Each structure stands twice: as structure tokens, then as C-alpha cells.
Amino acid sequence: MSYDIRLKDPVTDETLDLPLKHVMTGGTYQADYDEQTRTFSPKPISEAWLNVTYNYGRYYYDATDGDPRFAYDEISAYYADGTTGPVKTEYGIRGIYGKTGADSIPMLQDMIERIKAKYKPAGEWLITSRDRTRYRDKSGKEVDFYYALHHRDECSSEDYTEDISEGPCDDYWEATAANAIRPLYQLIAMAKLRPDGVWDGD
């Protein structure tokens, strides 16, 4: 699951094109395929679009909680009979939806500073603990989650705790503070190129 964030024309509601091509990538992105090397690489696009994994959501909620600029109303539940639960005030990255690129820049900058203040308080990224699950097949060999899911009767699981840095990580999907900050800088870059656009997403 992810946030699919776009900067749109306020009149036509079309996703805006930036004045230059970029390779800002997220959870999903357009790619070129090289038949000789059989590899994919990010395709330069001009669209003001960025996909951001929900894995970073807790950093965004935490950095915006209580800030009225980010508040938006969300229906708390949808039921099978067509009724809904009460409307609740939520916070997070969705708080920029409906804002112009120009208006969002200080908001995104504040998110970055708040995340850094919490997870890099003295200039060093904190080490935090994560609960993990390890999966093994019948022979005791470690297997990934998807293998275990498809062979659940033949696999066992074991919970453990791992300490990780909140700093930069090569694994895009790992929820770290630094990984969560990177898309915010990318959104700021887009907003500076098209301050007239209006954010939309999901």
C-alpha cells in the first residue's frame, strides 16, 4: 500500500508536467528495460508524481500530530450495509492534499525538521528496536515471507528483535526516519518547480 501523490493543475485537475524530466522514484515508478543487460532503470519523466510507501506513515503522523495545517477529516469506517462510522480528524502527509505547491513547502520543511529533531537529536541517528519474524522451511533453511505464505503448512516462524539505525538505508521499504524524509525533499523539489499546482493523492 502507498500514497500516490500528484501535483495537479487547479483548473483542469490534470497531473502537471514539470519543466524538466526527473528520476525521483518511490515505491512504484516508470522504468526503462535494457535488453542487453536485462536490467531495469528509472525512466526520466516530467510528471509531478511520486509514490511513497505506507511504511513511512508513522513518521508522518507523528511529525504532524496536532498541527492544524495538516488536519483533515476522515470517515473512520465503512460498513457492508452502506453506513459509515463517525468522521475523525486525522493528520499526516495527506494534510498537504488540497494545498498549493507554494503553501506546502513550509509544511514539508517542518515535517523534515520534526523528524530529524526526534530521530537525530544530537547529530547522530538513533538506534531503535524492531520486532521481526523469521521463517524456516522443514529443513530449517531460512525462507522469505512469500515462500512461507504459500507453504504455510511446511514452515515455522520465530519472532525476534533487531536494532537498526534510523539513518539512511539501501532498502527503500525499511521504515527509517531518513528513508521517510527523502520523499519529503522530493515533494519540495516538485512544489518549487510548480508552486501553482495543487496536491492530490491516493
Image: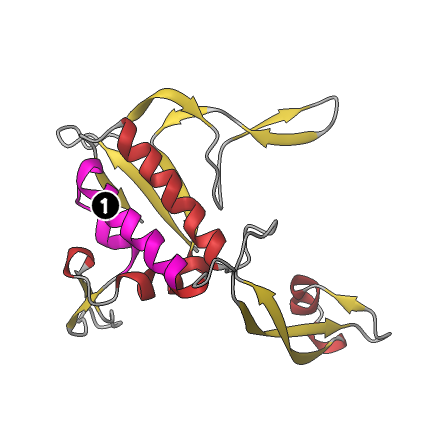
Q: Residue at 70% of width from left, 63% of height from top?
A: 144
Which residue, as the protein is rendered here, is positioned at the far right? 139
**Residue 40 versus residue 147: which sits nearer the camera?**
40
Q: Position of residue 185 (x, y in %)?
A: 38, 42
**Residue 62 versus residue 81: which sits nearer the camera?**
62
Q: Residue at 20% of width from left, 32% of height from top?
A: 197
Name the quadrant of the N terminus: bottom left
Main SS of residues in magenta: helix
The answer to if 93 sits in the magenta stretch is: yes
The answer to if 136 sits in the magenta stretch is: no
Range covered by the magenta-colored residues: 92-117
Vertical order, 136 against 197 (above or below)? below
The amino acid sitting under disc 1 is Pro
Q: Position of residue 36 (x, y in %)?
A: 74, 21
SS label for mark 1: helix
Vertical order, 160 against 82 (above or below)? below
Circle 1 is placed at which residue position? Answer: 106
